[in-house]
Image: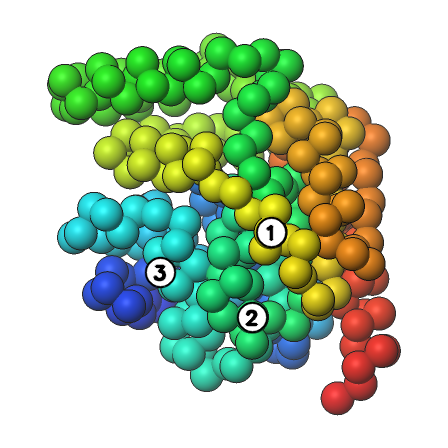
Amino acid sequence: MAAIAKSSGTFKSFDGTEIYYEVRGEGEPIVLVYGIACLINHWHFQIEYLSKHYKVIAFDLRAHHKSGVPKDKSQITIDAIAKDLPFLLRELGLQKAHFVGHSFGAPVLLRAYEQTPEIFKSISFVNGFAKNPIKGMFGLDVVEPLFYFLKAQYEKNPTLWDQLWRLAADNPLTMLGTGLLGGFNLKLTQLKDIQIYLHGVGQMTLGAFIPFFEEMMKFSGEPIAAKIKIPTLIISGEKDMVTPQKFQDELHELIKGSQFARIPYGSHCTQLDFPEYVNLKLETFFEELATENPG
């Protein structure tokens, strides 16, 4: 079967930052939002499958990959990404879309829903969270102090630490470590997808990663989640140690009427571990909505 054609482009967002996007397929629009330091490849199984029947839109977050870095560094924030979304729809001539967010993409969508609820047909969260997931990440409470140590060292010598960051991302041991800590299921995720991810991480500067990560730690989206009134699907990986299970359970409890699917053996990237399962859950969810709201 021939691959579905891709169109791509860029647009200037509210602050002039250039945002890169890709579009495949026709039909109801679905916007995919990846996590911090991730890349469009994280969605490649979903893009291939869903674009057969839907208009699938993926984009690079600001300060990631083919999108620009804001001239005003104070705009490297969750709020700023959330503001990019209505500009993306406007660029494509769309008023509303289904939104799917992975990991850090969840707080982005929560903030966007708070700012512009009128652009949402539905929300799906994959290994998402509504508040700081750092406490208990990997089953430990060491990530936050380690982060602030790294931040302090980076501020003293940015060039050196950007080089160390790239070297660490390209180290084969890093790939093993991300798997053992629950970032991927090493028995199921394709090796090339992990390699592409780590290469992408290395291409992102700590000057962009650090403010986003700190924003994530400060984010508190429970009040927003509790007010969500649109159809919502929550997909959770049972073996996810990056976003501990309790955060995904709490998200489900906060959003009344939300659907919940826990995937056995799923890691933090269930869309790569079990793509057929995730694709089926998303497709069924969208089909149910179309049946309930024809036209």
Secondary structure at badge 1 equals helix
Q: Residue furthest bottom?
A: 295
- The relative height of residue 33 versus residue 182 in the rendered view (above or below) is below
Residue for badge 3: 20
Quarter of the image for residue 151 reads top left
Residue for badge 2: 117
Q: In which quarter of the image is the N terminus?
A: bottom right
CA distance separating discs 1 and 2: 14 Å
Q: Where is residue 168 in the image (x, y as percent from the top left)?
A: 36, 16
Secondary structure at badge 3 equals strand
- The relative height of residue 189 versus residue 257 in the rendered view (above or below) is above
Q: In this view, does 273 lie to the left or right of 94?
A: right
Viewer-nearest of discs 1 and 3: 1
CA distance separating discs 3 and 2: 23 Å
Viewer-nearest of discs 1 and 2: 1
Residue 42 in view (yes/no) = no
Viewer-nearest of discs 3 and 2: 2
CA distance separating discs 1 and 3: 31 Å
Q: Which of marks 3 and 2 is nearer the N terminus?
A: 3
Q: Where is residue 259 in the image (x, y as percent from the top left)?
A: 81, 54
Q: In this view, does 170 lie to the left or right of 71?
A: right
Residue 7, which numbered label?
A: none
Q: Are there few (<14), some (14-19), or many (20+) residues within 10 Å of tag 2?
A: some
Residue for badge 1: 223
Q: Where is residue 133 in the image (x, y as percent from the top left)?
A: 57, 30
- The kind of residue tagged 3 is Tyr
- The kind of residue tagged 1 is Pro
- The kind of residue tagged 2 is Pro
**Residue at position x 60%, y 51% from top?**
223
